Image: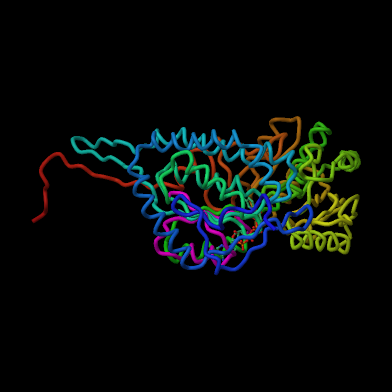
Amino acid sequence: MTYPTQPKASHYIDGAYVDDTSGDVIDVIYPATGEVIAKVHAATPAIVEQAMVAAQKGQKIWAAMTGTERGRVLRRAADIMRERNHDLSVLETWDTGKPYQETSVADATSGADALEYFGGLAGSLTGEHIQLGENWVYTRREPLGLCVGIGAWNYPTQIACWKGAPALACGNAMIFKPSETTPLCALKVAEILTEAGLPNGVYNVVQGMGAVGASLVTDPRVDKVSLTGSVPTGRKVYAAAAAGIKHVTMELGGKSPLVVFDDADLEDAVGGAILANFYSSGQVCSNGTRVFVQKGIRARFVARLAERLGDAVIGDPMDPNTSFGPMVSERQLQIVLGYIDKGVAEGARLVCGGERIDKKGFWITPAIFDGVTDDMAIAREEIFGPVLSVLEFSDEDEVIARANDTEFGLAAGVFTQDLKRAHRVVAQFEAGTCFINSYNDAPVEAPFGGMKASGVGRENSKAAIEHYSQLKTVFVRMGKVEAPF
Ligand code: NDP
């Protein structure tokens, strides 16, 4: 049977769909029902070779164009993505199971933002002039060459664009490998870029499991690797890239703190905790899953949070009223259920949720644990599911020390009406992305990335340009050369 989601072929190379059916079959499963909705093949070495050759050829043509010309292509692609937002959002929902209510405002739209933003910057990327008496130096901002992007499964369209847009703006080519769990959306991004006028070979998509990712990372023709994934995968990919002295961006996992002081606006803080834990069924890297609530407000906070969770609409992800969808896979669901059992066994109080819903697909009710202590597994390890832990605290110094007591450092948030305290607290957070009276906003204009084990480098904003380009220094002598002999 052919599903509406079946792509024309598994890979997108040199401006066209290609396949090699001798590659391992990857079933694409709709998380809401568990049914197979498409099949793709993992890239064989021949497919990887084809992508490498096409990318190297395409990059030269692309880099020879002016920044303004490159930017025009990216901005055109952004316009096409916005025009097709509905179809792209439906595909994102098929791929990930995330509700259409989310995908229609957070995925293709965010991808389009990245293409538009970096398209706008492309024409103004320059080096500088440094006068040294009569001599002078100028710097050239040059592309790195061939970049590999490797994506996680939670935001397949967004990740394909967040990596592709700055890479392309700087004149690089990209080979993108989506997660094997969500292989469909990146193909559409590649198709749209071609339609917008991108030269063939500049943006390619190859499918496959970790082994394909590893073969891309170790290929000597690759100059840069950008990974979005877990810390264990990050360690492997970083090490493999280091062997070839390649540039890296690592967007890895987290176990971020959200601190709620007594004086916070209760409804805002509860809303922030919901956004920090249950969007995309909790499958968001920057989630604030350790919710530290000050003693005086804790009981009211937990009661109101549980009440508002009761308003979650759990159902058909294609229904625009649905606000909470399934987990991406049976595997991820089992991981989350395992943590629910661990939390209970360690003595935390399960306030609500955490039960598998008895229907086809990978469904679980959103869970709140109260009475969580710092040493429990649910407070230390990234769960990547809809499990919020409430930890009580008494004073500011104590909560900062506890919030920072983790190997991760992706994000952190604080809710308080005392703005001096808010700024004092965020200044001490060991986290790359912080929020005051808000959570999980990710505008393309702002740098995004982690400290400590949560990553290296930054995506989005002008900061990303530094990670997709390199400076060449040119010294120019105007006078005679004075040599010692
Ligand atoms: P994984 O780390 O399992 O996989 C990430 C990607 O790396 C996948 O495409 C995977 O392929 C690939 N991969 C696996 N092994 C290797 C290898 N040895 N060499 C090269 N590539 C490899 O992450 P998940 O897909 O499970 O995503 C969830 C994780 O991603 C969470 O930890 C989450 O926090 C993090 N994340 C971080 C974000 C950030 O911006 N900081 C944003 C979103 C998620 P395949 O899966 O196809 O086998």
Check if residue 227 falls in the magenta segment.
Answer: yes
Q: Tell me if I can see residue 298 in this picture.
A: no
Which residue does the image show at 49% across and 34% down from the upper left? 75
Which residue does the image show at 84% across and 45% down from the upper left? 314
Which residue does the image show at 58% across and 40% down from the upper left? 111
* Magenta segment: 202-230
Is 119 above or below relative to 329?
above
Closer to the camera in the image, 466 or 293:
466
Which quadrant of the view contains residue 294? top right
Quarter holding the N terminus? bottom right
Name the side, left or right, on which 138 lies relative to 114: left
Is 208 above or below relative to 86?
below
Q: Tell me if I can see residue 120 in this picture.
A: yes
Counting from the top left corner in percent of width and height, residue 115 is at: 52, 38
Check if residue 218 falls in the magenta segment.
Answer: yes
* Quadrant location, ligand no. 1: bottom right
Counting from the top left corner in percent of width and height, residue 277 is at: 76, 46
Is 162 above or below relative to 117?
below
Closer to the camera in the image, 187 or 463:
187
Quarter holding the C terminus? bottom left
Name the side, left or right, on which 239 lies relative to 38: left
Name the side, left or right, on which 476 lies relative to 2: left
Residue lying furthest left: 485
Which quadrant of the view contains residue 465? top left
Counting from the top left corner in percent of width and height, residue 38 is at: 66, 57
Closer to the camera in the image, 480 or 65:
65
